[in-house]
């Protein structure tokens, strides 16, 4: 397997920066509610770019890192779809005007990306130095998978975190929006607008999501470049997906099941890898366990596609079944005497 060339990585970062600059300062300068056509076009573009990027990795570095990227991207994208539930609640809680929601998501996701990049660097440093961290990551993912499967991970209402409560206590914050402005003047006095709170909330909330997604992708690849680019491509299409699926998220009833299976699988994979490189003295006298089976990268990709694709397909079938019953209900009542 060839290593990813430095020039390719630098070129990738430049292109990704251009994507975000265009999204924020070109497309995002005209606050509006994106149409269904616009959302589909944007999502299709970013999905196509992710597929092309995986092909380029295959070309310059080999099949293994390409499969790792596709696996990581699908996992991060699936987890991001689940996170849209929380975004909907946040927008509703702060009464963000519809025409400003696209701009809010763009800035909030960018903040989250910067913070997540730092999180990835820390995770990469830990993984490279301490193999036993995989035991913690794996156990946490299995725990999260169980919570998602039994429904304890569902957020039915939004609760402000400590940082937001602290700001409200020590800063002058108005409840009225002033377009995209963070500061406004009321009766000659300066106030922060709710826009600042929304930015911080979206950004910090997405970092909390990273406690699930970052360990999950480190279970698929240890390459920080693959980890970061998988996250970037998953976040790029997130705002358009928000508007496209905002009203349909509650109909994806089986998505948590698919996500829990993926997280559980990756958690087990991480623990197996930790056993392979074991250095803990109380496990096999600090020696690696060579008899533990290894999970190939291609199998991870297959499991992710089957679990997420199967849960999405089952949700669509369930949704159509419910719609059919609702459509038939009025005619049944009309036939009654």
Image (cartoon, rainbow, N blue to C red):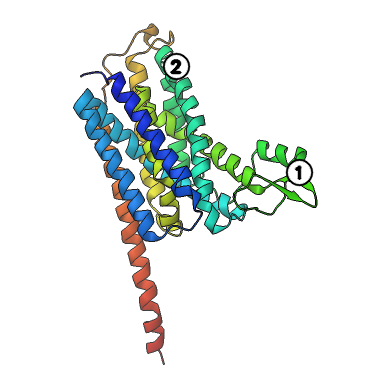
Q: Name above or below for residue 68 compared with residue 335.
A: above
The single residue placed furthest to the bottom in the displayed view is 337
Mark 1 and 2 residues: CB-CB less than 8 Å, in contact?
A: no
Q: Nearer the viewer, residue 147 or 238?
A: 238
Q: Residue 251's image quarter? A: bottom left
Residue at 43% over, 39% down: 20
Neighbourhood count class around disc 1 (C-alpha, 10 Å): few under 14, some 14–19, many 20 upward: few
Disc 2: which residue: 125
Residue at 59% over, 51% down: 157
Is tag 1's residue or tag 2's residue first in the polypeptide sequence? Answer: 2
What is the C-alpha distance between the residues marked 1 and 2? 40 Å
Q: Quadrant of the N terminus?
A: top left
Disc 1: which residue: 172
Q: Residue 316's image quarter? A: bottom left
Judged left or right of residue 169, residue 229 is: left
Residue at 76% over, 40% down: 169
Judged left or right of residue 93, residue 11 is: left
């Amino acid at each position: 397997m060839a290593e990813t060339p430095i020039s390719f990585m630098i070129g990738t970062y430049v292109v990704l920066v251009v994507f975000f600059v265009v999204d924020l300062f070109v497309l995002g300068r005209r606050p509006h509610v994106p149409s269904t056509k616009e959302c589909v076009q944007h999502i299709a573009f970013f999905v196509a770019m992710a597929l092309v990027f995986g092909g380029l990795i295959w070309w310059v570095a080999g099949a293994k890192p390409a499969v790792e990227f596709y696996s990581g991207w699908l996992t991060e994208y699936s987890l991001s779809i689940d996170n849209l539930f929380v975004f909907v609640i946040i927008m509703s809680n702060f009464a963000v005007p519809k025409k400003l929601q696209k701009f809010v998501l763009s800035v909030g996701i960018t903040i989250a990306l910067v913070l997540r990049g730092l999180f990835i660097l820390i995770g990469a440093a830990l993984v490279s130095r301490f193999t036993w961290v995989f035991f913690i990551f794996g156990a946490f993912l299995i725990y999260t998978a169980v919570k998602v499967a039994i429904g304890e991970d569902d957020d039915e209402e939004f609760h402000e975190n400590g940082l937001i409560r602290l700001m409200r206590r020590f800063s002058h914050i108005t409840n009225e929006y002033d377009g995209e402005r963070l500061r406004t003047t009321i009766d000659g006095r300066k106030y922060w607008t709710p826009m600042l709170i929304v930015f911080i909330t979206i950004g910090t909330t997405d970092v909390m999501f990273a406690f699930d997604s970052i360990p999950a992708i480190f279970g698929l690849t240890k390459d920080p470049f693959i980890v970061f680019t998988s996250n970037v491509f998953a976040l790029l299409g997130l705002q358009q997906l928000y508007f496209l699926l905002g009203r349909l998220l509650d109909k994806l009833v089986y998505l948590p099941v698919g996500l829990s299976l993926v997280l559980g699988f990756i958690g087990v994979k991480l623990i197996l890898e930790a056993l392979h490189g074991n250095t803990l003295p109380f496990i096999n006298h600090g020696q690696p366990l060579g008899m533990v089976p290894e999970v190939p990268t291609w199998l991870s990709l297959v499991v992710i596609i089957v679990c997420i694709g199967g849960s999405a397909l089952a949700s669509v079938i369930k949704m159509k079944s419910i719609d059919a019953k609702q459509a038939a209900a009025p005619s049944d009542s009309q036939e009654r005497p």
